[in-house]
Image (cartoon, rainbow, N blue to C red):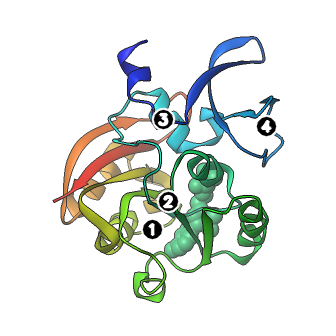
Amino acid sequence: MSARDAALPEGVERRAFEGDTRRLATRGPPVYGEPTDGDYRLWDAGRSKLGATLEKGLPTGLEGGQRALYLGAASGTTVSHVADFAGPTYAVEFAPRPARDLVEVAEARGNLFPLLKDARQPETYAHVVEPVDVVIQDVATRGQARVATANRRFLREGGRLLAAVKARSEDVTAEPERVFESFLDALNGYEVIATERLEPFHDDHLAVVARRA
Ligand SMILES: C[S@@+](CC[C@H](N)C(=O)[O-])C[C@H]1O[C@@H](n2cnc3c(N)ncnc32)[C@H](O)[C@@H]1O
């Protein structure tokens, strides 16, 4: 097993799909028309920033069974995979339309809890979310560092933030590298462990792994 694969959480495996023997997969009911193989379903890194982060071998600290808070769940593509290997998984999404699909995805998963909430206002879901081991963030919005900082309150000490920072959501005209520097400067209360750009899976995105300080 490669060092990269050793970092995969329990419940995420390499399986053969579409002629490629080494694709990421989790076990669970299919969600978005992804290829399946028995109980396994393909986790496509091209459709998921967290999938790409795992493909890149970043030290996510993910293990099976952890409690997770997912910010920017959309219609559930990535968070459904998270719920396949994690413990209780809280999924925050503020747009009603994707949130409707998310509710359907959650119906098939007893450990996935959708919250139609604004991730910039964590006080509106603080009464529901228990302390978590990991905060996963993929909110395509301005102020991504503020969102990560505001949701730090849910992380247990030493817990990790796994953020995918989208440069164009902050400033379409700025150099992505400058936007990423500003994100890291504005991130409060975290110690950054690793960063890596997500090309070729996702253009102009930076994966950030940070520990609650
Ligand atoms: C790139 S999409 C997420 C894709 C998803 N993470 C996946 O991989 O399946 C970004 C999502 O963040 C949501 N979003 C943006 N700002 C938000 C906020 N302040 N609170 C909650 N959700 C937000 C958007 O509505 C959108 O659905």
Q: Judging from the image, what secondary structure is the residue with disc 3 in?
A: loop
Image disc number at residue 142:
1
User: Which amino acid does the dot numbered 4 rest on?
Assistant: Glu
Q: In which quadrant of the rendered image does the C terminus lie?
A: bottom left
Tell me the kind of residue under disc 3: Glu
Label 2: how many residues lie within 10 Å, few (<14), some (14-19) or many (20+)?
A: some
Left or right of 8? Residue 195 is: left
The alpha-carbon separation of the residues under discs 4 and 3 comes to 21 Å
Q: Quadrant of residue 79?
A: bottom right
Work out whether 196 lies above or below 173.
above
Q: Is residue 202 left or right of residue 156?
A: right
User: In front here: 180 or 58?
Assistant: 58
Q: Secondary structure at mark 4?
A: loop
Please name the residue that numbered disc 4 is placed on: 34
Which residue in the protein does label 2 denote?
169
In the rendered image, which residue does mark 3 sit on? 10
Q: Quadrant of the N terminus?
A: top left
Label placed on residue 61: none
The first of marks 1 and 4 along the sequence is: 4
N-terminal-most mark, 1 or 3: 3
